[in-house]
Image (spheres, helix red, strand yellow):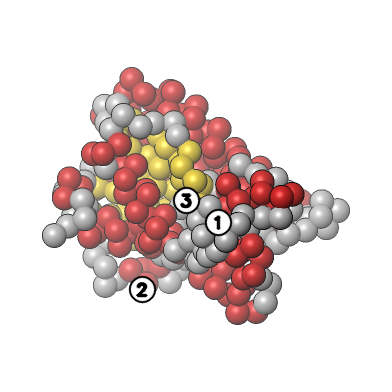
Amino acid sequence: MKDNPDLDGRLAVVTGGASGIGLACVRKFIGCGAEVIVIDRSEDSSEILEDIGVDVHVADISDAELVASLGQKIRTDRRVPDILVTCAGNLQRTLPPDELSWPDWDRIIRIHLRGTYACCKTFGTMMAEKGEGSIVTVSSVMGLRSGPLHAYGPAKAGIIHLTKTLAAEWGLNGVRVNAVAPGFTRTPAVEKGLDDGTIDMSLVAENTTMKRFVEPSEIADAINFLVGPAATAVTGVVLPVDAGYMVASDWGVFGGPRN
């Protein structure tokens, strides 16, 4: 039985769909009967996704003109997408401001904030013209809390604000816009950090009530809910999927959550 048969025949565009949360969304949507188009900057994305049955376009989403052109191609070759999920992103090292270079700061802001807006502007406008659609942006708990990520955190906070403004902008046009805010998620990049010691599993355990990472499939489940028929009155919300990071972090001054 399909997880969500009401996605049968729906067309979804997923950015960053060749790995991590994006790939989990692709697999989830395919399992629910949707058609999926992936936009990913990795030259290996087609090879990664060739056995799943999705169309792949290699592109950098921070190139707004390229995204607009790609959107027109998708509309001409297929149709206006019903779903957009903006998973594309990159990580930032935890550096103090004096060590975080302008090129690195610009790179993070460009991919996360500019790229998310470029995709929402292109595909959301088409959805609004059609009179229906659902967008889920991918923010982060770092967009809701302070942390030593002076580009990534503000970019993710910007995505949250953008999500709310677009939800208000397109509400009467039948387009819902929501966000998920993942906590520490076991993506390939995080797995690499665990392997080389740059990420300390014990610190993650200390600061989440569930004492664990979030799995990409769990983020995909939340996104699937937001784009599906059970959430037709939900728009402009930010849904943390964080294994209890948001509620645990304020307990630090009290010695942490009780076991």
Q: Nearer the viewer, residue 16 or 145?
A: 145
Total residue callouts:
3
What residue is pinned by disc 1?
209
Task: Determine the residue located farthest toward the bottom in the rendered image.
Answer: 195
Task: For the residues labelled 1 and 3, say whether their Cβ atoms are less than 8 Å apart.
Answer: no
Mark 3 residue crowding within 10 angstroms, few (<14) / some (14–19) / many (20+): many
Residue 172 percent across, percent down from the top left: 33, 20
Q: Quadrant of the C terminus?
A: bottom right
Quote the CA–CA distance across marks 1 and 2. 38 Å
State the separation of the CA atoms marked 1 and 3: 12 Å
Q: Which of pointers 1 and 3 lies earlier in the amino acid sequence?
A: 1
| Circle 2 Cα neighbour tier, 10 Å, few/some/many (<14 / 14–19 / ≥20) | few
Q: Is residue 63 visible?
A: no
Can residue 224 be seen at all in this image of the molecule?
A: yes
Residue at the (32%, 23%) spot, across then down = 173
Quarter of the figure with residue 93: bottom right
Indicate the amino acid at tag 3. Val
Q: CA distance from mark 3 to mark 2?
A: 30 Å
At numbered mark 1, what does the secondary structure look like: helix, strand or loop?
Answer: loop
> Is 69 or 143 nearer to us in this picture?
143
Instruction: Give the side of residue 227 with respect to residue 193, left or right.
Output: left
Question: Mark 3, mark 2: which one is toward the viewer?
Answer: 3
At a point 62% along the width and 70% down the height, the residue shown is 201
Q: Which residue is mark 3?
A: 241
* Residue reaching furthest to the front: 258
The correct choice, above or below, for 131 with respect to 19 in the image is above
- Check the image and name the residue furthest to the right: 98
Q: Which residue is mark 2?
A: 47
143 and 129: which is toward the camera: 143
Of marks 3 and 2, which one's residue comes earlier in the chain?
A: 2
Q: Nearer the viewer, mark 1 or mark 2?
A: 1
Three-letter amino acid code at the position of disc 1 = Thr
